[in-house]
Image (cartoon, helix red, strand yellow):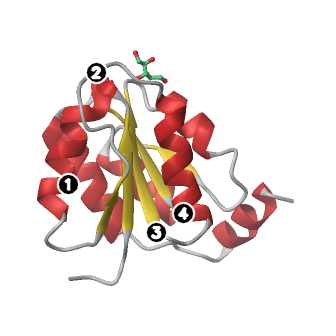
Amino acid sequence: MKDITIAIGCDHAGYEYRQYIIEAIEEKYPVVDFGTTTPDSVDYPDFAHKVATAVQTKEAHCGILLCGTANGVAMTANKYKEVRAGLAWTIEVAQLIKQHNNANIVCIPARYTSKQQALQIVETFLNTPFEGGRHERRVNKICS
Ligand code: RB5
């Protein structure tokens, strides 16, 4: 078991994807699951706030958020000072949000990726390091 706790949350659009991702990663990583736990319609900010709070307070090292387009959860999570939530719809973008932006939450558009792609995005996000250097200077300017 790796020493990286991952918070996960979604709305109804990401419900099945969340389940699929948890089953794939929970043997390797401690997962804090904020739901939603049924396919019933819910409001994405309620779940994005929970994941962002877990990352902000360091209850979790990083987070995974899913909604239809990933925009709603990203907009919500990025209200938190310590959060850098990056929207990733391909493997390459998942790499770049870590390498260049040091994202600590990956936001995945469930209605525009397959479940398998979503899992690959998660694995890429978790396994890609921040490059630092000039990117560190830029990341430091986000909150200034
Ligand atoms: C829900 O229908 C949808 O609006 C939501 O999942 C998301 O795409 C919002 O950004």
- Name the amino acid, label 4: Val
- Real-space Cα separation, disc 2 to disc 1, in angstroms: 19 Å
Q: Spatial distance from mark 3 to mark 2, Cα to Cα?
A: 26 Å
Q: Earlier in the sequence, mark 2 or mark 1?
A: 1
The numbered mark at residue 36 is none
Q: In the image, is residue 52 above or below residue 87? A: below
- Disc on the earlier residue, 4 or 1: 1
| Crowd band around label 2 with a 10 angstrom C-alpha radius: few (<14), some (14–19), many (20+) | few
Choose mark 4 or mark 2, whichever is in front: 2
Secondary structure of the residue carrying tag 1 is helix
Dot 3, how many residues are within 10 Å of its Cα: few (below 14), some (14-19), or many (20+)? many
Q: Residue at x 18, y 74 (%)?
A: 28
At label 3, the amino acid type is Ala
Q: Which mark is residue 55?
A: 4
Asked whether mark 2 lies closer than 8 Å to ligand 1, one says: no
- For residue 22, which numbered disc appears in the image? 1
Task: Where is residue 137? Give x, y as percent.
Answer: 75, 70
